[in-house]
Image (tube, rainbow, N blue to C red):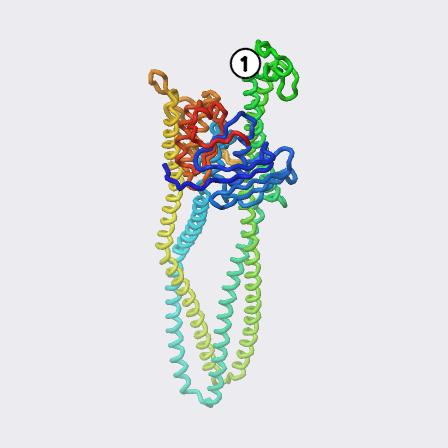
Amino acid sequence: MSTKKVEPKGALSVRNIGGIDETELTFEPGITILSGRNATNRTSLLQSIMAALGSDNVSIKADADEAHVELTIDGNTYTRTLQRRNGTIQTSGDPYLDDPTVADLFAFLLESNEARRAVVTDANLRDIIMRPVDTDEIQAQIDRLLDERRQLSDELDELDSLKNRLPSLEEERTQLQQQIEEKQAELQDLEADIEERDTDVEQSRDDKAELENTLEVLRSKRSDLETVRYELETEEDSLQSLQAEKQEVEDDYENLPETPAGDLDEIESKIDQLRSEKQALESEVNELQSVIGFNQDMLEDAGNGVFDALQTSAENDDVTDELLPDDTITCWTCGSDVEADQIETTVEKLQDLSKDTVSDINEIDAELDDLKEQRRERQDQQRQRERLERRQRELESEIEDTEARIQTLTERRDDLREEIKTVEAEVEELEDESNEELLELHKEANQLEYDLGSLESDLERIEDNISSIEARLDEESDLKSRREAINDEIEELRTKIERIEQQAIEGFNDHMDTVLETLDYENIARIWLERTEQQVREGRRKVTKSVFELHIIRQTESGTTYEDSITNLSESEREVTGLIFALAGYLAHEVYETVPFMLLDSLEAIDSDRISRLVDYFAGYSDFLVVALLTEDAQALDDSYNRITEI
């Protein structure tokens, strides 16, 4: 049990909430009992507190377009204004809670409370229990790690491809080294021959120097041409790769599902609309429950004759005659005499309408889940579309730059070819018949040097490729280690969700045992949850998800226990089970640490002695425990409790 610091009393001011026109009252710390008959605005007062704390599950008075509530606790004032606009209720102000999710589920336990109704209607209990837990962020981390793991796998696949290329590159390097050695030997022999012949040629040194210089220029030009050719080949390969990637990106873009313009906005609008419809239906359920309860009480009074006697005592002094059995009842709404069976039939129809409305709320919840899944898919498609569009623009820019470089290199190649022709012509002019053979040797040597330079450039390129691949392969171990680490992280996060779910179930089971022990029902031995894996519908797909199954263990008078299902319980037993589930959530999620109020309503399915034990138990958790009770149930509670009998 939590030891909490008691807050000073709270002050509440309400206008046009539920059935309340306007009221002001104060709450003392501890337990406050709202005592009275049905249809006396007790539920409306609880809704007013909910509104000030931040809940949207609040209804505006039927004949008003705006409602306002103000709550002061410990010198701090919290306000909320609700307005009808375009068929929806819009809120503003400064409530106590920024996010009322956990309070709506487990602190504001009215008849329409979602946690209570989830048990009664056999809805998704996992969604109720896990909603306050941020498992979405854990799943987002898993998705990010999955993306990183895919990238690492792609890199490792690329390394495998490079590893397969390495032997052919090494073989090519060996061949080039052999060719270079052969060319060097051939050039060495040729230069020796030239030197020998030079001694026999009578040529002026100037002519020889000029020829040598021209040949050197020719060699330089040819070397430049080879460099340009290599760069041009590299750029053309790069252009092909860029164009191939661009085509892949365009194909991916074309294969994206068509998303109609405004589709996401339409889904968002539909979600808002359904939320408003759900809020309106929940308000309708609250109002129906109030009307049903009021009519049931009046029928009970009318059935023993007291109400009819009081209705007509002003006109007939013989009250005793009015207490005689009669099949007719004076309607408390229009004043006419009607059959009691007719009133009972109307009440039954109202109960059926209430159940149908709850069913409509469940259908809206299912449709909301479907729309949220569609919204996520649309958002993912939009992000993918934007990423592909961005990559298309980047590739177009890179292709444009590459084409510009190719154009520049092509022009440079053509210029060098023309320059080489010019230099070759100059060499021809310098040739002399007397040393034509020697000049041929020089030209042959020049060609050998050029070929040797090309081979050395090719060797340098191959060695650079080999070095680059070997450097990349050095990363393989780190990449594999990182991938293994990511696998461990993914598994840890996945098991973390499982652990959170299991811990939540254990907490719920422990606290349901505690609450059930407090209520002390002889025929219900235990209520507990079990986590299982099932195929469930998520939007338009079926996926495997964890499901929380509710088990109810019965006990006979002889002490024999057996398992029963929620569908076999009586209506009052289902109501009690739903309340036990919601109260366990209040304890398991430690709602009392963040929400100063706990609100209890519609406890008619529990007898007054058990209500008293329940209130006493939860009094130690909440600063303000506000309980709405019928007069006869309130009488069983301690007289020291704060009481409000008029609103």
Q: Is residue 258 visible?
A: no
User: Which of these two is toward me, 304 or 561?
Assistant: 304
Residue extending farthest left: 559
Q: Residue at x 61, y 17 (%)?
A: 311
Q: Amino acid at mark 1?
A: Asn
- Relative to 294, 196 lies left or right: left
Q: Residue at x 61, y 15 (%)?
A: 313
Secondary structure under the numbered disc 1 in the rendered image: loop
Residue holding disc 1? 304
From the viewer's perspective, is residue 221 above or below residue 395?
A: below
| Horizontal and vertical percent position of residue 355 | 55, 25
User: Which of these two is toward me, 524 or 381?
Assistant: 524
In the rendered view of the protein, which quadrant contains the C terminus?
A: top right
From the viewer's perspective, is residue 410 above or below residue 134?
A: below
User: Which of these two is toward me, 615 or 132?
Assistant: 615
User: Which of these two is toward me, 225 or 297?
Assistant: 297
| Horizontal and vertical percent position of residue 200 | 41, 87
- Relative to 511, 574 lies left or right: right
Query: Quadrant of the rendered structure where residue 23 is?
Result: top right
| Horizontal and vertical percent position of residue 643 | 48, 31
Specify few, some or many for label 1: CA neighbours under 10 Å numbering under 14, 14-19, or 20 or more. Answer: some
Q: Is residue 319 visible?
A: yes
From the viewer's perspective, is residue 262 above or below residue 307?
A: below
